[in-house]
Amino acid sequence: MGEALYRDGAAEPPDEDAVFERIATALADRGWCVVDEGLPPPLVGDLADRVRQLSTATFHTASVGRDQDQMHNAFVRRDEIRWIEGEDAAEQAWLAWAGRLRSYLNRRLFLGLFSFECHFAHYPPGAFYKRHVDAFRGEANRILTTVLYLNPGWAPDDGGEMLLYPEDGDGEPRRIRPEIGTLAVFLSEAFPHEVLPARRDRYSIAGWFRLNASTAERVDPPC
Ligand code: OGA
Ligand code: MN
């Protein structure tokens, strides 16, 4: 009898198109979804190793919008980030996976997603990101947010949950534990969210699918 390797007791990794279809259906129905084990666990493990290997010296304190006021930034968010450009095999495999998800969602939901930008994020103990939305109506070219968590054995009292509030408003948020392999996907304009302070180092990849924002002055590179 084969040993169960995956959380749902299955011996095989989840079929990629089945995962993409689950995401597409949830986005069409309600604009968000959380998938526990949507990516191949070996890839997620490599990304978790990668983010820990990258020296904290290469991470930058994240900035907020166009706000240059560092005092204000530190009040809003305390994470450190490093943009992912495909510099190693794990980064390339992740970008390729995101590219296939982009094509799937464009075929299935006609979203017109053009590119994907993403960064590793490290929240040291006590770090947080106050309630915000990832895009503003009007200037929005960020359409869809993804957050992939990279923390094995995250206990309920480690804190660090992402609170995902109901669309455009108030009410009880969903609490998403940043356990390794958990992927959250939601419409960037619609869902306010925040990151609670954690008691451990907390690692993730935040990513955004964008529309083509090219103008006469600025050509948006596809990636
Ligand atoms: C972000 C963000 C959520 C998380 O980077 O914009 O909201 O759980 N991240 O890391
Ligand atoms: Mn966000």
Image (spheres, helix red, strand yellow):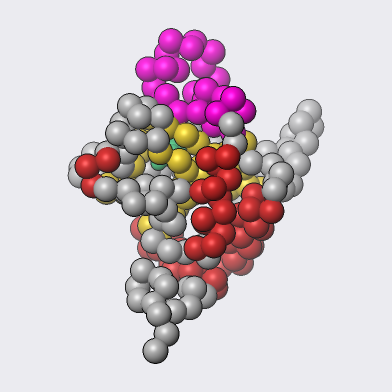
Inspect the magenta stretch and tell me whether residue 76 lies in it: yes
- With 51 as the anchor, is 10 left or right in this view? left
Q: Nearer the viewer, residue 154 or 30?
A: 154
Asked whether residue 125 is in view, the answer is yes
Quadrant in the rendering for residue 169 = top left
Q: Quadrant of the N terminus?
A: bottom left
Residue 82, how many percent across, how many down?
Answer: 59, 33
Q: Nearer the viewer, residue 68 or 140?
A: 68
Residue 116, how many percent across, how many down?
Answer: 63, 47
Asked whether residue 143 is in view, the answer is no
**Residue lying furthest bottom:** 1
Residue 10, how many percent across, how many down?
Answer: 40, 78
> What's the magenta region?
56-82
Residue 31, how many percent across, how many down?
Answer: 40, 55
- With 53 as the anchor, is 92 left or right in this view? right
Quadrant in the rendering for residue 77 = top left
Q: Residue at x 45, y 17 (%)?
A: 73
Q: Residue at x 39, y 61 (%)?
A: 36
